Amino acid sequence: MDVVQPVDPGSPGGLPPPPSGEPRAPVRPSATTIHGFLAVVRRRLLLEAALRTAGYGTGVLGAVVLLLALIATNVGPAAFWPAVTVGVSGTFIIVAMIAGVWRPAWAIRQDRAAARRAGALMPSMASDLLSAVELAGLPPKDPRAAAVSATLVQAFQDYVAGSVSSVDARRLVPMRPAWRAVAAAVAAIAAVIVIGTLSSSMARGLRTLVHRPSLFEGAAISTAPLVGDVRVTYTYPAYTGLGPRTVEGSTGDVAAVKGTRVRIETHPLRATRRALLLLGGEALRGFSEALLIGIAAGTYSSIWISSAVALSFGLKAEHLFPTVHKDPIDQLP
């Protein structure tokens, strides 16, 4: 029994190659030269757009940061400032990248669009370059390709390829606008640094944008009243037999019997984040300090000084806690 070895399609003695969906035109050196030229132009255009977007975007972002710092200086420390700073900066960067980089890259993604941009930079070859790209992109089955001589198309593409070969694509795209944008970015960064260094209020605002404050950070003691009228309501204990009493326009002083529930109501005269109620205040400050010092001194003297004095005098526990002798119980009836 003979064994037949399999053969690859298209090899000598094998099956014919499978038919492709559409015949392709052979790649010519001239078409490759034109495509490479347009690829260099495309990269150069994208580089110029990216530098220009980054430069002017940094300048505008610096102005936005200074504006936020000015607002933060007037508003004061708040927990939402870091989130606002990140949100505004992130949104601006995303919009700038879409408008300044992604949109131009999408517009020149094809050779035809790149040929139009290159033709705008060298008007003498605009029509020839665009025609060569369009002729190279025609499939063989297109009726327009059948109506044009392939020899003439090849000769025309060779002519265009020879013309673009003498052009330096890297120097074709001017980079002066991009360098101006970079200079604007450097100037904006320097302006932010100088303003933050010379102006204490702007420096405080810049720190506020990236700092999450603590509970009462930024609060200060004011000599002027910061609250309106104070209302004090007393709810007396049941044993007094008294009903609730409300004092309008109170100074905040509280005087009541033990067991009384006191409710203090007031409203601030300016915008506030939170409030802290301190009982006593300046009137009890001296007493509190004296009490604290007395507790510390008394504890030290009781442990270290008094014990040493007692030992030096020969005092014992019997001297401090004498033994109590009980009288015998009377056994008489």
Image (cartoon, grey):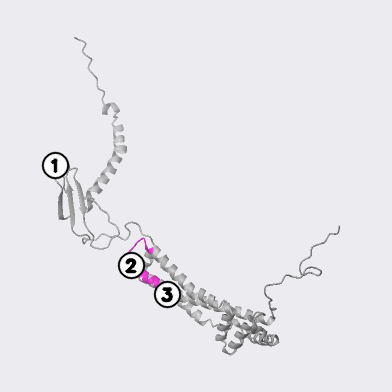
State the residue lying farthest toward the bottom. Answer: 124
The residue carrying pointer 1 sits among few (fewer than 14), some (14 to 19) or many (20 or more) residues within 10 Å by Cα, namely few
* Residue 77: percent from left, percent from top: 34, 62
Foreground tag (2 vs 3): 3
The residue carrying pointer 2 sits among few (fewer than 14), some (14 to 19) or many (20 or more) residues within 10 Å by Cα, namely some
State the residue lying farthest toward the top. Answer: 333
Where, quadrant-wise, is the N terminus in this rendering?
A: bottom right
* Residue 3: percent from left, percent from top: 84, 59
Specify whether residue 106 is painted magenta: no
Q: Amino acid at mark 2?
A: Thr
Foreground tag (3 vs 1): 1
Instruction: Tell me the element at label 3.
Output: helix
The residue that mark 3 highlights is: 60
The alpha-carbon separation of the residues under discs 3 and 1 comes to: 71 Å
In primary-sequence order, the first of circles 3 and 1 is 3
Give the extent of the magenta segment: 59-81
Foreground tag (2 vs 1): 1
Instruction: Tell me the element at label 1.
Output: helix
| Residue at x-position 59% and y-position 90% | 124
* Residue 17: percent from left, percent from top: 74, 70
- Residue 240 disc label: 1
Specify whether residue 76 is painted magenta: yes
The residue that mark 2 highlights is: 73
